[in-house]
Image (spheres, rainbow, N blue to C red):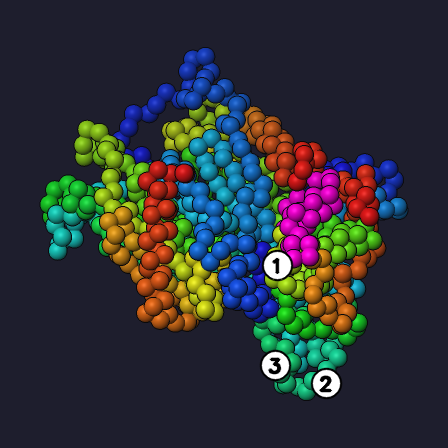
């Protein structure tokens, strides 16, 4: 992602195992999740994760447009992952580029793996992810936001889908890369976990890793996903919580 | 959660209420919804603002990049305004190329910014005929519950007013500096509901509207842009009344653009 | 008890019902909602999402398309529901459908049947069903309808008693309200209060105190009923069904705040 001019590679890992922002190797960036952030959508969520800001909305199940995509035996799940022009350092031309289209596809397929789509034949479940501010890991933040939005929209599914990227920085396996680590690190491995089954429904990798490093990365990622899972559940519980009785007169 | 088709009895009810000077949400005809403005919402932008107008939410982001001046304006920078009515924001929006509605919002917002001379474009010139700043304003509609034009321009002007020129990052100057706006255009939109003209329409009121008129004013008392939209008509007297009301509301909304949340 | 998708449900030998699934002998929730044991099943009653039709539900819909032998209705469900011309009390000839109902008309219909393709069959034949004239439609989350009706209709009775409005509650979250403009506004405010706040205990008290506080005062004190009550019966749907009680018991209000109201 956009850095202007050549820069020196920053020190990604100090000798005592601290990262560029002071985190330890297995530490997540701060995450805040708000379920039901929008009014028009059937379900929605806003996620602030490190310096990422991502909004997700779900519409449906509803009639399919365009109609030729309709499937007789299940709902079609469509996803549109998009980055706002101002979400990155160098302005991004509005519209879906090839990267956005690929991410949209793998996210849609991840959700198809957990949504009980056969309950709503001939309909569409439309997932919209808008990256408003990007700092590495936007597909994972988008997945988390969309998953909370799907639950908020009352969509039946096997489980929520926590997601996180693991990478290799300064020779070490690290959880949840930020931008500098993503740009200058040696590997990036985003994944999404179905906690109920312990299986991965999104998995991509770019860079260099040994077999042993990959094994450790998967373990670290699953552990990170489980932490994020708790935050997702807490956000939904907060939205649907039965609050204390109204204090005093209404 | 609006359906794809607004029920006619809802539209009729909105018109019946308007005939008595009332509105569905209890507002008077001359009352805006609650406004909040959050400048600096997006740090990846050179300037930004999240504006909420009732249940409508719009995010504007500014990006400045070095470019080349147009041959006919060698001493001026370049402005570009774009609004995206993304399908996340309303059940009626489909993915795909910009729809006429989005293009209209873009152009009406752009026109007000230009005509009010919001930015002194000569300050965006680096080397005449060769190098200047291109200032991109991108408006992202997040929640469309009516009156996108007013929310979009308020977000855009607030973002511009709080923007920084990234001169250091691009090696053009030793330090970044504030963009500085010289005028604050504000658009106020009215719709006709029968014989009543209401300000700041909701989505449902826009469906019931018999004509929409947007008036942009600036802090010097100038009218800088207008746009009549939707099916319907206004008399010259209607227009005069609307302009008067636009100046009053414009003054109040401008305080948000200058200072963020008031 | 609130459960989320993927959470294991202590099933105590019960079979997985709606809103749940079973893997390897364990039962999990598939939707966000309240856990509701209904021996021999355990089920989850959704708290959010679109209206999912059930046979015999009375719903409020809007005509979105007119064909030569049927109309398509938006009832807020995953799919549009076809209303065939034979499913009306009228004698409709092929090609004459638009004479009876056009796009934007609102109707009260009943869900007759659902087939495996998700097709929703509805009928307008039945007491209290038909085209809606006058009044307006208020839309809330379908899952909150049980709260609007209240135990044995207590909530809806409270609302109509204090406002004099005529109300027809669609199980799909769309509520037809007719009466004086002020009465409609108060009912609408109460419905939105229930939509946003319906899970908190003490709902009935909050609704009653709002209605008492907003009671219009005439020269002879509070004017409770509408001045000109109509003779015709209100459309159906305002009557509590078994399902309403069911959801009530599972809600947090079961301590009895609803029953306190009478």
Q: Earlier in the sequence, mark 2 or mark 3?
A: 2
Residue A202 appears in which quarter of the rendering? top right
Q: Is residue A50 above or below residue B128?
A: above
Residue B10 appears in which quarter of the rendering? bottom right
Asked if residue C13 lies left or right of residue B131, the reply is right
Q: Are marks 1 and 3 on the same chain?
A: yes
Q: Mark 2 = which residue?
A: C91
Q: Chain of mark 1?
A: C
Dot 1: within a 10 Å radius of its alpha carbon, few (fewer than 14), some, or many (20 or more) residues? some
- Pointer 2 and pointer 1: residues touching (CB < 8 Å)? no
Q: Mark 1 = which residue?
A: C182
Q: Earlier in the sequence, mark 2 or mark 1?
A: 2
Residue at 31% of width from left, 61% of height from top? B226
Dot 3: within a 10 Å radius of its alpha carbon, few (fewer than 14), some, or many (20 or more) residues? some
What span is in magenta? C192-221
User: Disc 2 and disc 3: Cα gap in Å?
Assistant: 13 Å
Q: Chain of mark 3?
A: C
User: Disc 2 and disc 1: Cα gap in Å?
Assistant: 38 Å
- Pointer 1 and pointer 3: residues touching (CB < 8 Å)? no
Q: Secondary structure at mark 1?
A: helix
User: Disc 1 and disc 3: Cα gap in Å?
Assistant: 33 Å
């Amino acid at each position: 992602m956009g850095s202007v001019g050549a820069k020196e590679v920053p020190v990604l890992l100090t000798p005592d195992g601290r990262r560029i922002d002071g985190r330890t190797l297995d530490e997540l960036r701060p995450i805040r999740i708000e379920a039901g952030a929008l009014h028009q959508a059937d379900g929605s969520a806003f996620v602030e994760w490190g310096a990422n800001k991502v909004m997700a909305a779900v519409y449906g199940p509803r009639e399919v447009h365009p109609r030729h995509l309709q499937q007789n035996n299940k709902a079609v799940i469509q996803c549109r992952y998009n980055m706002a022009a101002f979400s990155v350092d160098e302005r991004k031309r509005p519209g879906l580029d090839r990267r956005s289209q690929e991410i949209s596809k793998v996210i849609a397929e991840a959700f198809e793996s957990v949504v009980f789509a056969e309950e709503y034949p001939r309909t569409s479940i439309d997932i919209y992810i808008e990256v408003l501010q990007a700092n590495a890991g936007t597909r994972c933040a988008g997945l988390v936001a969309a998953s909370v939005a799907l639950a908020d929209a009352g969509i039946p599914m096997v489980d929520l889908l926590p997601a996180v990227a693991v990478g290799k920085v300064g020779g070490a396996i690290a959880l949840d890369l930020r931008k500098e680590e993503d740009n200058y690190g040696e590997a990036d491995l985003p994944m999404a976990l179905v906690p109920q089954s312990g299986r991965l429904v999104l998995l991509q990798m770019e860079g260099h890793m040994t077999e042993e490093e990959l094994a450790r990365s998967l373990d670290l990622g699953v552990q990170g996903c489980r932490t994020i899972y708790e935050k997702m559940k807490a956000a939904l519980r907060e939205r649907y919580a039965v609050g204390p009785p109204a204090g005093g007169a209404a | 959660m609006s359906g794809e088709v607004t029920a006619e009895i809802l539209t009729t009810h909105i018109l019946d209420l308007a005939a008595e000077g009332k509105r569905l949400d209890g507002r008077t005809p001359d009352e805006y919804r609650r406004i909040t403005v959050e400048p600096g919402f997006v740090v990846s932008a050179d300037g930004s603002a999240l504006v909420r107008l009732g249940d409508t939410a719009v995010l504007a982001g500014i990006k400045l990049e070095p470019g080349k001046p147009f041959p006919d304006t060698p001493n001026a920078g370049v402005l570009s305004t774009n609004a995206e009515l993304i399908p996340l924001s309303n059940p009626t929006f489909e993915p795909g190329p910009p729809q006429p509605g989005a293009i209209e919002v873009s152009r009406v917002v752009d026109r007000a910014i230009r005509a009010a001379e919001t930015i002194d474009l000569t300050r965006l010139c680096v080397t005449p005929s060769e190098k200047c700043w291109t200032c991109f304003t991108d408006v992202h509609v997040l929640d469309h519950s009516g009156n996108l034009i007013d929310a979009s321009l308020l977000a855009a002007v607030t973002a511009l007013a709080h923007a920084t020129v990234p001169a250091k990052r691009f090696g053009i100057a030793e330090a970044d500096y504030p963009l500085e706006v010289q005028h604050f255009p504000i658009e106020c939109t009215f719709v006709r509901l029968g014989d009543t003209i209401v300000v700041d329409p909701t989505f449902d009121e826009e469906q019931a509207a018999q004509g929409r008129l947007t008036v942009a004013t600036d802090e010097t008392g100038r009218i800088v842009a207008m746009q009549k939209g939707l099916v319907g008509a206004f008399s010259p007297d209607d227009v005069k009344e609307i302009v008067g009301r636009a100046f009053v509301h414009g003054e109040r909304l401008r305080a948000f653009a200058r200072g963020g949340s008031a | 008890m609130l459960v989320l998708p993927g959470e294991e449900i202590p099933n105590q030998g019960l079979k997985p019902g709606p809103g749940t699934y079973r893997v390897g002998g364990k039962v999990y929730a598939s939707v966000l909602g309240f856990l509701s044991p209904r021996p021999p099943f355990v089920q989850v009653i959704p708290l959010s999402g679109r209206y999912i039709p059930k046979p015999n539900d009375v719903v409020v819909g809007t005509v979105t398309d007119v064909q030569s032998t049927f109309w398509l209705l938006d009832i807020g469900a995953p799919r549009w529901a076809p209303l065939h011309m034979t499913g009306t009390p009228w004698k409709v000839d092929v090609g004459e459908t638009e004479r009876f109902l056009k796009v934007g008309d609102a109707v009260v219909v009943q869900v007759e049947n659902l087939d495996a393709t998700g097709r929703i069959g509805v009928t307008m034949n039945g007491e209290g069903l038909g085209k809606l004239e006058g009044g307006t439609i208020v839309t809330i989350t379908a899952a909150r309808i049980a709260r609007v009706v209240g135990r044995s209709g207590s909530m809806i009775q409270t609302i109509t008693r204090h406002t004099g409005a005529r109300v027809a509650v669609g199980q799909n979250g769309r509520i037809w309200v007719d009466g004086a403009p002020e009465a409609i506004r108060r009912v609408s405010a109460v419905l939105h209060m229930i939509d946003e706040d319906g899970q908190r205990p003490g709902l009935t008290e909050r609704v009653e105190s709002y209605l008492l506080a907003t009671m219009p005062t005439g020269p002879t004190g509070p004017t409770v009923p509408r001045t000109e009550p109509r003779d015709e019966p209100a459309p159906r749907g305002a009557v509590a069904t078994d399902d309403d009680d069911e959801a009530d018991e599972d809600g947090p209000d079961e301590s009895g705040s609803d029953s306190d109201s009478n």
